Amino acid sequence: MTHAYDVSHFFAGLMLVASFALLYQDRLFSVLNIFAAQAILLAIAVGWEAYTQQRPHLFITAALALGLKGIIIPVALHRMIVKLGVHRDIDQVVGVGKTLLIGLALTSLSLLLVLKITTAAESFTREGLALALAIILLGFLMMITRQNAITQIVGFMSLENGLILAATGARGMPLVVEISVAFSVLIALFVFAVFVFRIRERFDSVDIEALDNARGDQS
Amino acid sequence: MIPAGLEWPLGGLAVAIALYVLAAGLAATLHRSRAALASVYPLALVAALIGAAANLWGVLANHHQGLVLPIGLPVIGLHISLDTLSAFFGLIINGGVAATALYGIGLDRARDLSPRIEPFFAIFAAAMNLVVLAGDAFSFLFFWELMSLTSWALVVARHDDAAARHAGHVYLVMAAMGTAALLFAFGTLAGASGTYDFAAMRSTSYGPLASAVILAATLAGAGSKAGIAPLHAWLPLAHPAAPSHVSALMSGVMTKVAIYAIIRVVFDLLGTPAWWWALPFLILGAATAVLGLLYAVLDCDLKRVLAYSTVENIGIIFVALGLALAFKSGGYTAAAAVALAAGLLHALNHSWFKSLLFLGAGAVLHATGRRSFDHLGGLIHRMPVTAALFLVGTLSISALPPFNGFVSEWLLFQAVLAGPVLPEAVLRFMSPAVGAMLALAAALAAATFVRVYGITFLGRPRSGQAAVAHETSRPQLMAMALLALLCAYGGLFGDVTVAMLQPILQRLAGAALPGTGTGPTAFSLVAFSADRSIYDAPTIAVFLLISGTLTSMLVHWLSGRKTRLAPAWDCGFPDPSPLTQYTASSLSQPIRRVYATSVFGVREEVDMPPPGDLRPARLTVWFTDYVWNWLYAAPAQWLVAVSARLNAIQFLSIRANLMMMFSALIILLLLAAVWL
């Protein structure tokens, strides 16, 4: 049984590494590749949970993660970038070193917090939960540090990966919730895509700062 | 067939409340019809009489009835509970509603009725009844808020008047704050177990910290509704802004509902008192009593002076409650019973004479269209009945025997005099100080009402409207006469009322008064024992009557009947202009100079033109309301400034918004990591 947890912690750890890699990538295509890799890792991790916990419906979640986030979304974003012609470098707001340090601090915060407050829970799921929280926080951090709309989408999706990981690690999450989460992510992608195209149309750029100049409510 | 639990007297109250709601519904749906609007008052009168009878029965029979209705919040339901305390305050409410509804019947159909007033009047009456009947915190707060909102609607009924709008705004803010504080108090009372039922709260005991929190929140919440300083500022704005019969209801009755809330929480739910609970009551009460009257002395608006005097009377009731707490904590139950009886009796008496005075002010306002003292005067000739009835009200409120104000204040001073038995040095020193403040307040009250009566009814009219004033309608006079009779009854037979209070005193103070029949004569009120403290009202009244008659006969006999000739109007009035008489501000000048100079920073400036100059001389008086400036205006400015700053948050960029959410999340996680 310990063995099963070791493996799932391994995959969760790999996802965390992918999150860190996302933080400092400054090219759009490599961001997409790493995101796809993280999604595939998520699919494997969920598949492993399904196998060890004897919960076959988690295979559906794994398949959704693999299909939607591992293939469809990265491909769609890839085509979007090509179509928009924005495959140039990404400018980062905070320097790489600082961002990674903050990411490190967030990871240790989530470890400290989860390990401290879940002492009563099953010992092996706790680490998984801590890693998932770290992935969520890093996804959030990525959304903040990036100025490009597409990397923001990726940040959001990676945050959502952390949510799925946390949900499957804990027992008893019904399938319908997972499907609806996956569905809402897909919807979010559509919304984001429309949003990005509109920005591009209006401002010749996908830099979200451009939006601020066009606001009418500025006092 | 009467449903279970709805037997008399609770059933009577249910009928009364149903009638109030019916009246409101009728007036609201047929609001274009004058007849439908006018029908509110007879219906409310019938409802109030049924309700008052039920309440009286509930008090006399020392009866407790409870009922849980399956409406309201799921699981909790709606707890209705009628015990002696709620029945007594219900009696105050329905008595006040009966008098004001009778006055309302006499309103001018064409001029005074409005769909903004009548429907809310009935709902307001029903809401006050339901507040005292509530048996759990949720329904209590719900009906409390209903009471606040309906009375707010009545305050802003004359919304074309900017002063009324301002009053409504201040009232709404204070009422919201008060309800929030009460919510906090009841939340703490419910505690971790989360039972909102009063019966469960009663059986819980609270630690000193929890008691302090509950006490402070209750004082802030219910105290602001009652008008305790420094939370009184809305009251003199809002009470006079409403139509006069509603002012009577708000001042005479709604403040008593707030007193009920305080007694319910502090004496009933909170358990055995500690000695320091008395401190805020004594300090705030004494300060309120004096401060309220100093405002009243400075003010020149008839209805506002009455509202300030309400603030003073609430202060007196607070002192009584504080003394009751002090005695109860020390185990002196007999003295606690005297103090609590004084408080309850004063609440009842004040509801009668304050309603009487406000109705009288309404009659004056209706007859002259003026509220300012500078436009009144000489009304005793044109409104003789109103003037006589108003005089009864002023005598009662100035605590002169044989009227009811004296009975409750006499009881209160008996309690003050028992103060030296208290074990805590602070309280022992405080009780004479509070007594001195009360004595000052009593003197100031007398001065205030000499001024009110003298300027309004005596002398010569100061305006054309006052000169052509007419007596008010018969139902309105009947309403005032009823209240005046009650004032006289309360003064003569105070011991009967006190006998009615015995079960409440027994339960909340732990002892009862000696009771009827222990005094030397029938109807003499005994505070502690017959050899120490007796107020023999009927004997004193007879003595006053005989000595008064004899004195006036003696004066007439000595002065002789011979007619003497003298220059016309030369008795201090050589100039026939009404401007030469005393004005309201000149009458209050000595008190203003002595007391208000430091409290309000009063400045007077006399502009005397040199001989030969034709412009009029002018006396200008400035005063600063420090309480308003520091506790209301300054925080309001600060709030506006801070919100203007925080408004910038609304215009942040997407990333800055995300950043704020993220920082909030991280801060919360850090807090959780540190504290959990």
Image (cartoon, grey):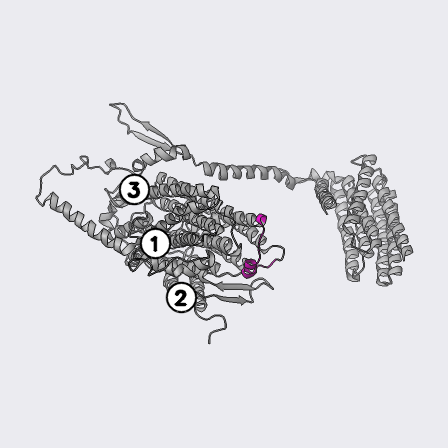
Quick check: can you spot residue B233?
no
Q: CA distance from mark 3 to mark 2?
A: 46 Å
**Is residue B216 left or right of B455 when viewed as pictured?**
right
Residue B263: % across, % down: 47, 54
User: Who's the residue at 86% across and 61% down the image?
Assistant: A53
Do dots 3 and 1 share one subunit? yes
Magenta region includes residue B202: yes
Front label number (2 vs 1): 2
Asked which quadrant contains residue B623, the reply is top left
Residue B33: % across, % down: 39, 61
Asked which quadrant contains residue B673, the reply is top right
Amino acid type of the residue tagged 2 in the rendering: Trp
Q: CA distance from mark 3 to mark 1?
A: 22 Å
**What's the mark number on residue B131?**
none
**Pointers 3 and 2 in contact (C-beta within 8 Å):** no
Mark 3, residue position: B375
Amino acid type of the residue tagged 3 in the rendering: His
* Chain of the residue where label 2 is placed in the rendered structure: B
Q: Earlier in the sequence, mark 3 or mark 1?
A: 1
Q: Which residues are magenta?
A: B194-209
User: Who's the residue at 38% across and 32% down the image?
Assistant: B597
Mark 2, residue position: B57
Front residue (pair A43, B378): B378
Mark 1, residue position: B111
